[in-house]
Image (tube, coloured by chain):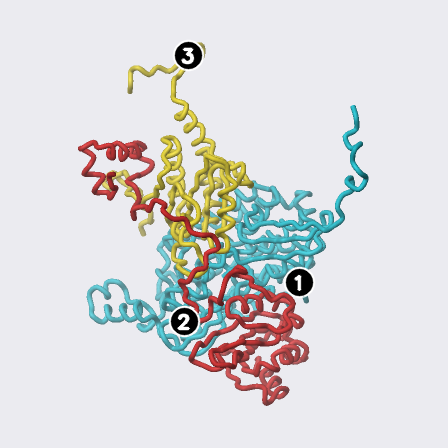
Chain colours: A red, B cyan, C yellow
Amino acid sequence: MSRDVLDQLVQRFDDAVLATHDQFGDETALITADVWHEAAVFLRDDLVCSMDHFIDLTAVDFADRRTPRFEVVLHLRSSERLHRIRLKAPVGLGPGGENPQVDSLVDVWKGANWFERECYDMFGVEFVGHPDLRRILMYEQFEGHPLRKDYDAHRTQPLVPYREGYEKLQPFGLPQGMPFGRQTHDRWKTAVAGRPEDAGATNLLGFEED
Amino acid sequence: MEPLDVELEDGELELPTDPMLLNMGPSHPAMHGTVRIVVELSGETINKADVQIGYLHRGFEKMCERGTWSQVFPYVDRLNYASPLLNNVAFALAVEKMLGVTVPERCQHYRVILGELARICDHLVCSGAMAMELGAFTPFLYFVKARDLIWDIFEEETGARLTNSFGRVGGMAHPPTANFKEMVRTTLPAVLDLVRDGENLVLENRIFLDRLEDVSVMSRADALALGWTGVVLRSTGCNYDVRKHHPYLTYDQYDFDVPIGQRGDNYDRFSCRQHEMKQSARIIDQALEMMADDGPVNVDDPRIVLPPKDEVYNTIEGTIQHFKIVMEGIKVPAGECYSYTEAGNGELGFYMVSDGSGTPWRIRIRAPSFASTAGLGQLITGAMIPDVVPTFGSLNMIGGECDH
Amino acid sequence: MNDNIRVIEGSETGFATTRVDALLGWARKYSLFQYPFVTACCGMEFMSLASGRFDMARFGAEAPRFTPRQADLLWVVGTVSQRQAPILKMVYDQMAEPKYVLAFGTCASCGGFYDNYATVPGIDKVIPVDVYVPGCPPRPEGVIDGLLLLQDKIQTGDRTPAIVKPRTDPVPASEGLVPLRKQA
């Protein structure tokens, strides 16, 4: 069904279309980044395509497996003709994928606004011409772009200093069970105070005497 | 007594004419705790609004790249936590699309029933929370009661009330229990009664209607350009439901209607949800009729589905098979795929890139409420402060999904 | 039964003795004004807890205050991200003493399975916690357990943190427990 769209695209942009495929039934065109905006306008306005429904925009980081390192991925749908297409553009040509840049599509579909901000936030892809390109999911003070493969998943950047020196709990906590023995709470207290008959029980539960 | 203002200069008595900046949220009772809206006010009218999300960003997509394909299911549960089973089914379908397998028909009906029950839950939560934020607490209590009835079924079927993690690639975690059909058949009318009771309390209430009708209108073209899907898109008059237009599972076998709104205001969004619950009940009724009482639930493919437990413990083949699937993960063919289903809020899509190993290279979730929340700023610009609350409620922003 | 205890009839007059701190503790534990800091999935269970079936109003803890200045129990319901942490700290600082914190669910208690760049590994990294309720999300019964545990701690004036532990059912199986799963 969306074969037509792909043909139209190839016909119109000829050399700029690097590759096409329809793996798993999803028609895909890989185009160069410099015709990104032009192709988007074409897809929206062409009568055969009429892609008026903006679906998704994201990026994929291929790390060192591919140059250019990033691919910006756009999914579109036509509300009249019910077909879909995926448009991709490689960005980040330099070694290590520096300065990935692509034109912003906010003036084509205004829904692209937040999606591009998210993409910038997560991957650091810069959208030229975006009216308000700032972080959306992470906070301003955050350094780096978390979804890049070289960002360590564990590396946190706390905004407030963590508390220190607070009481660490035993893995299963203090020997308190609720609510059937409402007195259990008092029992461990007296046990700490040194009642010999309770001492064994508390040690068993891992409560340290001091 | 002397007048108090006798000492004041004239200039001090005038109200300031600059626009006022007001911060709503993120810890605001009507903001569900996860959204911040900075509004620039002129009087009580909103001149400009900056909607800030991300307060519940939990790194879903990063976490997916760290485990096997099957280990994504618990994270998927917590995306749209109002309807985890729909997400489970959506993700299972996405991986199955890449693997090129189709689950047996019995499982498809089973998924549909559980999914539609989850959809009812989703709409109940949304409508209930919206009514509560407008001051109507009783419908909320009715709706939560109805939801608890459905959760009883989930608990019986899946073992968990909310975060079920019940979907599996190539089937479900367990076949339906023996009493499943009977349970659903007895519960569903009770749920619909409660929904009707709750609705009747608000739908003839002048105050409630005044705050909904013709408030925050969205046009069809704008909704499409914003990427809206699901109920919020249908309320603007655009007929798009993935279940009808790109049928998956056995949705093409059922007879159901898709409620469409006319004006795209808060009322349309609210009533589309209410009607959709009734349509979901219709689908469930038909699916219960069609679902076979016995037969396989999982696909018969040892590379995808875990062997039964007694085989794992008693035969070496079963042990190896179990070990391979658990430790290495299901091998998904290399390539890229976008799979989409109709979730509670709209089109829930997964764009997945596989490098042929047992670990996903990239899983991108196309969250429906991310797109709809993006339209919030446009909806409330020019509106009054009190309109923010019903508008935000009717968009059904779910933090886990919206903030990934 | 203790023979020394006698119920005072309506027509009689009498008095009771207690200590001030015990009286205060008693008064505090049954009038917890809560501030629900609801962020994520656990909020769904919180809805169940607050409404008809589980009804936390039974324990004197139903009145939500939407300003932390009027509240004395902070429910942290759901994941707290790094971005949310300063806000949580601010809300906690705004509450008046005595204040109590209940960490609802695994994410609030220790970060849960979101062990990554975005989330705080447990709200106790930011604010002190009185009671931890594990579960993802916890069942409402577990939360009620936690609430009762907190009430006990308020009564005794004990501020050490505690965890609601999984426990076995007090009724022995031989006495005919109702099986949770219906038999086929």
The residue wearing badge 1 is: B237
Would you place residue A136 above or below residue A67 in this image?
Answer: above
The reply to whether label 1 and label 2 mark residues of one chain is yes
Would you place residue A101 above or below residue B25 in this image?
Answer: below
Amino acid at the residue labelled 1 = Gly
Letter of the chain that mark 3 sits on in the rendering: C
Would you place residue C90 above or below residue B235 in this image?
Answer: above
Crowdedness near tag 3: few (<14), some (14–19) or many (≥20) residues, C-alpha within 10 Å? few
Residue B94 is situated, as x and y percent measured from the top left of the image, at 45, 70
Residue B373 is situated, as x and y percent measured from the top left of the image, at 59, 59
- Are the residues tagged 1 and 2 within 8 Å (C-beta)? no
Q: Secondary structure at mark 2?
A: loop
Residue B291 is situated, as x and y percent measured from the top left of the image, at 42, 62
Q: Nearer the viewer, residue B187 or C56?
A: C56
Letter of the chain that mark 1 sits on in the rendering: B
Visible residue check, residue B297 = yes
Amino acid at the residue labelled 2 = Pro
Mark 1 or 2: the one toward you: 2
Label 1 vs 2, first from the N-terminus: 1
Q: Nearer the viewer, residue C22 or B273?
A: C22
Query: Between marks 1 and 2, how big is the CA–CA gap?
Result: 38 Å
In the picture provided, is C163 more to the left or to the right than A115?
left
The residue wearing badge 3 is: C14
- Taking the spot 57% from the left edge, 72% from the top edge, the residue there is A126
Check residue B360 in the rendering and tell me which mark sits there, or answer none: 2
The reply to whether label 3 and label 1 mark residues of one chain is no
Mark 3 or 1: the one toward you: 3
- Are the residues tagged 3 and 2 within 8 Å (C-beta)? no
The image quadrant of residue C148 is top left
- Taking the spot 63% from the left edge, 57% from the top edge, the residue there is B50
Crowdedness near tag 2: few (<14), some (14–19) or many (≥20) residues, C-alpha within 10 Å? many
